[in-house]
Every structure is written in C-alpha cells, then in structure tokens.
Amino acid sequence: MGELRIFPVEGIGEVRQGDDVAALIGDAVETSPYGLEDGDVVVVTHKIVSKAEGRVVPIADEAAYRRLVENESQAILRRRRDLVIAETPHGFICANAGVDRSNVAAGWAVLLPIDPDRSANRIRRRLMRRFGVDVAVMVTDTFGRPWRRGLVDVAIGVAGMEPVADLRGQVDDHGRRLEVTEVALADEIAAAADLVMGKANRVPAAVVRGVAWTPADTGVRPLIRPPDEDLFR
Amino acid sequence: MGELRIFPVEGIGEVRQGDDVAALIGDAVETSPYGLEDGDVVVVTHKIVSKAEGRVVPIADEAAYRRLVENESQAILRRRRDLVIAETPHGFICANAGVDRSNVAAGWAVLLPIDPDRSANRIRRRLMRRFGVDVAVMVTDTFGRPWRRGLVDVAIGVAGMEPVADLRGQVDDHGRRLEVTEVALADEIAAAADLVMGKANRVPAAVVRGVAWTPADTGVRPLIRPPDEDLFR
C-alpha cells in the first residue's frame, strides 16, 4: 500500500435550498491543483447536502427544538438533561437525532438528509459524468461515542463502495486467521477526511486519494449493527 | 488548512521482546522518501509495542484465554457467548480487554501495554533526539463500537499532543457558538493511519503529516469519558 493523501475542497460558499452540491464540489475540484482521479473517495459533510435538500427548519425556541428532536427520532435510547441519544429513522444512533444548530443561521436547525445514500449516489453520478472517472462518494456527520470523549465523523451515506471491508479468510503473518474480520472502512475514511475539514471553517468536503475500496451499491446499511447483535441498546 | 498525507512505515519485520521500537521505526523512516518532519504524528499499532515490552503470553487452550481476559479486565460490562466487553485497568472499554490472538504465533496472545502513554513517550523522545524534529506519537488499537458494525483504530497511548481538540469559544460562519466543542483528534488520526496500515500486512506504523495539533502532555486520559458522564455502562 502506498501513501494516502487528503485534499480539502475549498471555496464552497454558503449552500442554499436547491443548490446543486455536485456542481459546487465539481467547480471547486476543477479549479484545484489536485483534481479528481479514478479511485478517489469524495467525502461531503451532510450539512451542505441537507441545506441543498431543504432540510433546514425554523425553531422558535428551545421547546420547539426539543419537539423537533423527538420528531426526528424513531426511538429514544437515553436522556440526560438536554441530551437525548436517539435512533433516527435511518437506524443511526446519535445525539439529538442528528438535529444540529451549528453552521446555520440563529433560529434554524439542520436535519439529516432523508436518504443520505441517495444523496451520495446523486453526487457520485454527476461527478463521474463530469470528470469521467470512477469515484466513491460518502456523506458524513459528527457523532459522539459511549466511553470515549470527543466526537468523530462517521459515514451516514455511501455510494459506490463497500463501507465495511470484510477480511474473513485473510490470514496474518503467522498464518493465523484474523480475529479482526470487519473494518469500518467508510468510518475510517470519514474520520480521516474530517482532519482537513475542521468544524468552524468552511471546508465541507474533501477528496481522499489512495484508499483501496471495493465497488458495491449497498449504501451505508452494512455499517449499521442490527439491534439483535447489539449489546448496548 | 492544506493537504494531509499519510505514509506507511514499511520494512519493520517481526518484533520480539527487548526490541527497540523507536529504533525500528527510525530505521524505516530514515531510509524512506518521506522522512520525519516537524509536526508529524507517528502512529504505532500497540501490537509491536506490546511484543517489544514482553506483553505476550502463552495460552494453553480456550479456557486459559478466557482466564487471561478476566485477568486483564477491571470490570465486565457485557457478555455474550465468546464475547466479553470489558473495561481495562487503563479505563478503555473494548472486546476481550484488548487480549488478541491475531498477528502472533498460535498458542500465544498479545496484551495491551501496561502504560501505553509511557510507551508513546519513550518512542517520541527517541525519535525527536534522532531526527531533531518535534513530533507527536500515539499507540493505537482496534476497537469495535456499539450500534455500528466494523472496527476502527483508536488511540490508547498519546505523547506530545492534546488528544481532544477543544473548540469551545469558536464560532461558526454564522457567528453561532459551535455545538460540537470537542473533537477526538487522536482517534481521527488513528483511524486515518489505519487506512495505510491494514490488518493482514506488516505495516505496523504510519507517519501522518499535515494535522494541526496542540502540544500537551496529558497522555490519552482526556479521551476517556468519566463513568459518571457515561450513559452506556
């Protein structure tokens, strides 16, 4: 395996409902020194996807925000003071069902895309047509974790690649079957991309070059642990 | 922010008790085209650190392995069939208390280093002296997560840098205080580094170039969520 490179996609301004995210990313990439190559993974924070798709709603007050979080939840796992850990209709488990009030005008909240796989697929098709290359695309959000402090970016929508790399059948240097059989490749890529995106600065996308991925059209689903396999619900 | 680059540290063979991990990494880096620069983060899988520190033990059978996992645990959170989710003496919560039988000869298991921060610090001091540059070093392991399938690499030992980036006080483009205030920077770096390391191939370290980190000597502790803040124990 060789070197991995991650490029921030810069110059994308404020995104509004109806904007074409693929065109915005394409314009930024086209004028960049790194361009877009076969095998690249384009990582997009859901914030701009949600805004383009009109998933931004006004919230009059804290109570309205709380109601919105309940509406966006299909199950509540835990509550403590202001914090709700909820399962979204997509099957993601995260704080406040992904409803976010950062990077949006005061009095508004950004929701998760209704179908982040579909959003990723649409961006992928357009980028592939425009640049004539085969790339994967993922949409990400920032999640907390039990037991560990600090947040990390994870994949919530995936297009074109297997999100979980299955190493079953592979052996280590001692000829022993690997105990680690499934690597959350898409989540590792999402976390890596966040390193060039930051939270306060307007870098809502990144191009990751040098990851070996397997083509697939499963979307994000393989990353979601089925409830009956889960010990912490 | 500019481009991020991640280089696999290749050419490190099988590591044995008493080996000098910093020297092995230094030799590999010195003969590489990328070298070591100010601001780099050197990421090392704990497997080679544990082996060098003699944290490898024979296990006669499955029952011996089970006893070993219990010995390495300071608390058991969940059990299901063969799987134990345990808290280690370091405060990490992970499968089988980090006891691993991959990438080691059959009949043996690798334990976590006793003090991974100390291991990271030792490697850091030696690399800094040898190369005359200021770098951060982290030791990583591969952990599962609740709710999401697939494993990701996380930091279990940190030297030289703040593992959690505190964004409190920063505002977004709308002048709004950021809701995301703590980014698990070290874990995002660990996940990124794993993208060049793989699991089956002998790349036990990586050099990450282009991350802005803040000097600190807290070790890994800020990444561990205090039990009273945790909703999933």
Image (spheres, coloured by chain):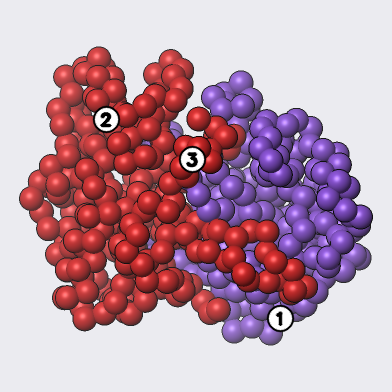
Chain colours: A purple, B red
Q: For the image shown, how many numbered marks are present on the structure?
A: 3
Q: Using the numbered discs, state the Cα–Cα distance from disc 1 to disc 3 in whole angstroms.
A: 36 Å
x and y, in percent, of residue A2 in the image: 39, 65
| Mark 1 neighbour density, 10 Å: few (under 14) some (14–19) many (20 or more) | some
Q: Which residue lies furthest to the left in this view?
A: B18
Give, as a three-letter code, the residue at label 3: Trp
Residue B109 placement, left or right of B225? left
| Mark 3 neighbour density, 10 Å: few (under 14) some (14–19) many (20 or more) | many
Residue tagged 3: A147
Q: In the drawing, what numbered circle is on residue B72? A: 2
> Quarter-wise, where is residue A129 in the image?
bottom right
Instruction: Say what secondary structure mark 2 lies in.
Output: loop
Residue tagged 1: A11
Q: Using the numbered discs, state the Cα–Cα distance from disc 1 to disc 2 in whole angstroms.
A: 50 Å
Instruction: Say what secondary structure mark 1 lies in.
Output: loop
Viewport quadrant of the N terminus of chain B: bottom right
Q: Mark 3 lies on which chain?
A: A
Q: Which chain carries label 1?
A: A
x and y, in percent, of residue B36 in the image: 29, 76
